Image (cartoon, coloured by chain):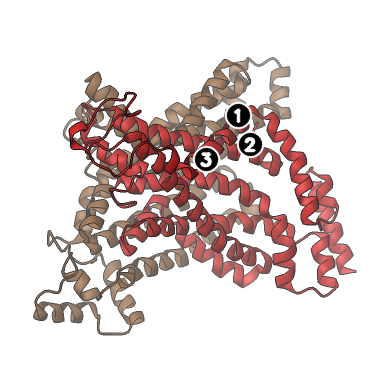
Amino acid sequence: MMAINKSFKAIEGSASEGIVRPDEVIPARLSWKQRFDRFWDRFQDFMKNRLALLGLTIVISMIVIALLAPLIQRYDPLQQNMSIRLSAPGSEHLFGTDQYGRDLWSRIVHGARVSLYVGIIAVGIGIFFGCPVGAISGYFRGKTDEVIMRFMDAFLAFPPVLLALVVVAILGSSLFNTMVAIGIVYIPRFARVIRGSVLAEREKEYVEASRMIGESNMSILFRQIIPNCLSPVIVQGTVFLAYAILTEASLSFLGLGIAPPNPSWGSMLNEARVFIETDPLQAIFPGLAISFTVLGFNLFGDGLRDILDPRLKER
Amino acid sequence: MNILIYMLKRIIYITPVFFLLTIMVFAMIHLLPGDPADILLSGEGGSGDPVVREALMKELGLDKPLPVQYLVWLKRALGGDFGKSVYSEEHVLKLFMQRFPATLLLAFAAMIVSIAIALPAGIISAVKRNKLPDYASMLFALFGISLPNFWFGILLILLFALWLGWLPSMGYMSPLESISGSLKYLLLPAAALGFRMAAVVTRMTRSSMLDELGQDYVRTARAKGLPERTVIFLHTLKNALIPTVTIVGLQFGTILGGTVVIEMVFSWPGVGQLLVEAILTRDYLVVQVCVLLLATFFLLVNLLIDLVYTLVNPRVALE
């Protein structure tokens, strides 16, 4: 009886908001095959969105450049040659050379590797730790929720760059620590995203039904609810990936991220600042690379949001 | 009455968050590899005079269990004693306070710049939806969220300081000294810092304006023959501003974090510069005070915005 009442409430609840979408009323126990088919349907819409397509193109080309960096580079990005330092772009050195005579094009290509690597791992850390925590918080509610979210709020009280800086200050700066530092920044953010969806999802009929046939809480949460809450995580993940790349660039720019001589776009910009008056191109190319990549992920994320999370759709 | 209770709840709510924050900042020193006494005595991790070391251990209670140490630290911190910098021998709170006004000035200037750009851009964009001005503002917004602020800062220096020579490329002048002189130094860093926020706020203003323009009361206002200007500025904008104000508050954290990077670009003598230099020289008590006070400040700003928001829009108290 309670179950019926609850399911009525669920339907009334969504009706009072004025949006009853078919997939909200139908119990959402989908197989992964069905999920994929649904995604594929929506992907057709995505392909019609020209800006999103542009974003996808940028993202894919950046991934390809990063993967094929050793093949695309024309010189060793670390090899110094003082006789040709700060040379102008030309056929020999596509983007010119830096103050140590290192080929700028090769360094930027390798910088794509570093940026994407750090971005993906950092967001991965955020999802891996943030999602279970946020999901448990939203599913069990009550005291658990209070305690967990209060902890997350304490993390959120740090402005993002500041938190990453603190972690780097504690751990020391290295590639791995940069990824951990940025990952920690996104743990509470992912926790919040998934908690919101789980709160809505746990009131639905299929959850009630699973409970009645005696499925355990953990099984319901991880095998049924979480798969239905992944859309906002994917959408936010893409956007946070863009932010993570920006944060890495900021840290490296401050000399607290990827250590020289390793090519990171941020540390390249830091080194180029000294020559800004005489050789502005040194600072322009790495900056363009960051902006272009972040733009790509932003456009791609916007497009994904339109198809995966239509409620948030911007006009 | 409901509103008062709600506001009181919000205030009580941040108290545990604040204490968790202090625990995290306190733990920082203990998470560092090495012995806290050595870390505090020497920037490079070497140990100093054993007598001095012993005295410091006593003073900070470093020989006691961690929870006791925390309480000792918290008591001192709440009294304003965060210890002394390893290098300058100054109280770190004093160092922070010397730098904080410059950071506040920069942060607020950046907010003003961004709102001055974002409100008109967002409104025009919504009113001229799907026309050229709309596309132009949306393009601007897209670039705004994609350009790293420090790179944008470098570009601004390149254009306005080095090529055109209109503004100084870096440095700071206190507004108490000369307002116009101070503005000259302020303009470029504030623009670099506010650019991203301008983009975010433009998007928000546009979307909430579009929401409001579709409402019945707007149609009624138009139907009774009010001039379009009155409808937009007096009726629609007032309601559309509520979500905009919220996003401005949320973005303040990003601005505060952004000052760290922008201060390094423009040699702006604020807390960000102090913090980065302290991290590079391992002056951890300075790091500690900067982090704790910046985060607390951000927490308080958010609380303030929550409270203002409740007054402007009392409905949130009922939910």
Viewer-nearest of labels 1 and 3? 3
The residue pinned by badge 3 equals A64
**Vertical side of A269 occupied by A151: above or below:** below
- Compare residues B190 and A185 and report the one nearer the observer: A185
Residue A161 image offset from top left, x and y in percent: 39, 50
Display colour for chain B: brown
| Amino acid type for the residue under numbered disc 2 | Gly
Q: Are marks 2 and 1 in contact (CB under 8 Å)?
A: yes
Residue A303, numbered label: 2
**Identity of the residue drawn at 30% across and 34% down:** B189
Q: Which residue is mark 1?
A: A51
Q: Quadrant of the N terminus of chain A?
A: bottom right
Q: Position of residue A295 (x, y in %)?
A: 50, 34
**Of B52 and B116, the residue lying toward us:** B52
| Residue at horizontal 33 percent and vertical 42 percent from the top | A76
Could you tell me which chain the residue with mark 1 belongs to?
A
Q: Quadrant of the C terminus of chain A?
A: top right
Report, in whole angstroms, how far the alpha carbon at label 2 lies from the one at label 3. 21 Å
- Whether residue B131 is situated above or below residue B49 in the rendered picture: above
